[in-house]
Amino acid sequence: MKIKKPGFIVGLLLLTFGLNAQDINSPFSAYGIGQLYGENISTQLQAMGGISFGITEKNILNMANPASYALFAPATFIFQTGIIGNLSTLQNTANKQNSNYATLSNISMGFQVLKWWHVALGITPYSKVGYDTRISVTVPPYGKILNDRFGKGGTTRLFWGNGFKVTKNLRLGVNINYLFGNSRGYNIIYFPDSAFIFGTKQERYINLNGFLFDWGMQYDIHLAKDRKFTIGAIYRNATRVNATRSSITYTLTGGYNNLVDHTRDTIEYSPDQKGNIFIPETYGLGFSYSHGERWLVGAEGEWQRWSKFSKFGMADSLSDSWRIALGGAYTPKHTTISPLRKRITYRIGARYDRTYVRLYGYSVNEYAVSAGLTFPFKRLRNNISLAMEIGSRGTLKDRLIKKTFFNFSLGINIVEHWFYKRKYR
């Protein structure tokens, strides 16, 4: 196998950029296991609103439905990577704050093992924690009381996917996911108006690891020449992943207005408590209608039962979440010598999410519109893709927080032959 130099160089640049990632800044990530990344790791799919369950593009590694692996072209190797980034503004009725971050979206690969069995391997973020909030109240006779809450961390997913071609039109698949990661949370209370009252600081650490299983199905209905209707469905079973937590609470002085904090006395210390985190099941259904490689339209829905989530046996204030999305792609009719504008694939999409976070009776909803382009290498199946998304999450009602964001993604797909010998060089 020979990797073409342009794709190899871009892949290295993406990896270097991703390893220098920044933390997210979202108060919503303080709930559950953090801000979820989902399974739409491909830039091409992100540009179409995230539709994926019924997508069957043979040169895209579609992790969201492992049944799609069964359509990898014979004797080929697919390498996929990219970066995702975010520019956002957090605001309530009194304040506004800007933030940004970027991180590696995935390193993944796929290939054929047998005629009926295809495999995918990779690593991708699963969730991210990053928040920093302050609440200030005045309580006589203590004066002003400050409560700072901040945290960071996240969960990573290693996956081994298998796609099986059962019949000409039916495909089944399974992803075996291994989750691992940790998070750290801090809760500090200060009394800045009194030199005689100690503050209190609590530190919490959680480590987790365990397996998740994704099951997928796709079925093609051929309606006319080069026209195909594909139905896709996914299911992730509920599971309990192993977790260990530690916490320490102590009194302190200083620590605010750039003062160094000084520990005074330990109130409580609980090291290495073992337990588990219950992650509930997920259901998804989608479809796509395509005309060869010229155009495609699709839609899907997903539901997750987060109201059953628990951490160390305690329920969290989460609600069931659901998502709907629609999108499409169009590639002008072209040949290998056509100008670039005719060889580009144009993508567009939209989505609406009701996330699992619910605050003061309000569901934290998210909506976004997206668009993107895929640029092919001339006479090669390798390509570079760009995607962008504009949307918002949350509400300003009852002094809550609203987040407006601009997400972007840059991805590369390298598609090469396996065990292919050229007769002429």
Image (cartoon, rainbow, N blue to C red):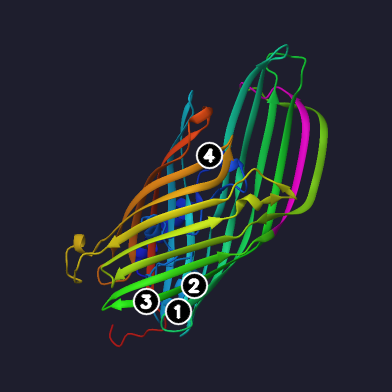
Q: Give the Cα separation between the discs numbered 4 and 1.
A: 41 Å
Q: Nearer the viewer, mark 3 or mark 4?
A: 3
Q: Give the Cα separation between the discs numbered 3 and 2.
A: 14 Å
Residue at the spot of label 4: 26
Rendered residue at 31%/69% (across/down): 290
Residue at the spot of label 2: 217
Q: Are marks 2 and 4 in contact (CB under 8 Å)?
A: no
Q: Nearer the viewer, mark 3 or mark 2?
A: 3
Q: Residues within 10 Å of mark 4 (few under 14, many from 20)?
A: many
Q: Is residue 33 above or below residue 162?
A: above
- Amino acid beneath label 4: Ser
305 relative to 202 in the view: left or right: left
Q: Nearer the viewer, mark 3 or mark 1?
A: 3
Rendered residue at 43%/60% (across/down): 300
Q: Give the Cα separation between the discs numbered 2 and 4.
A: 34 Å
**Most prominent secondary structure in the magenta stretch?**
strand
Report if residue 186 is visible in the image: yes
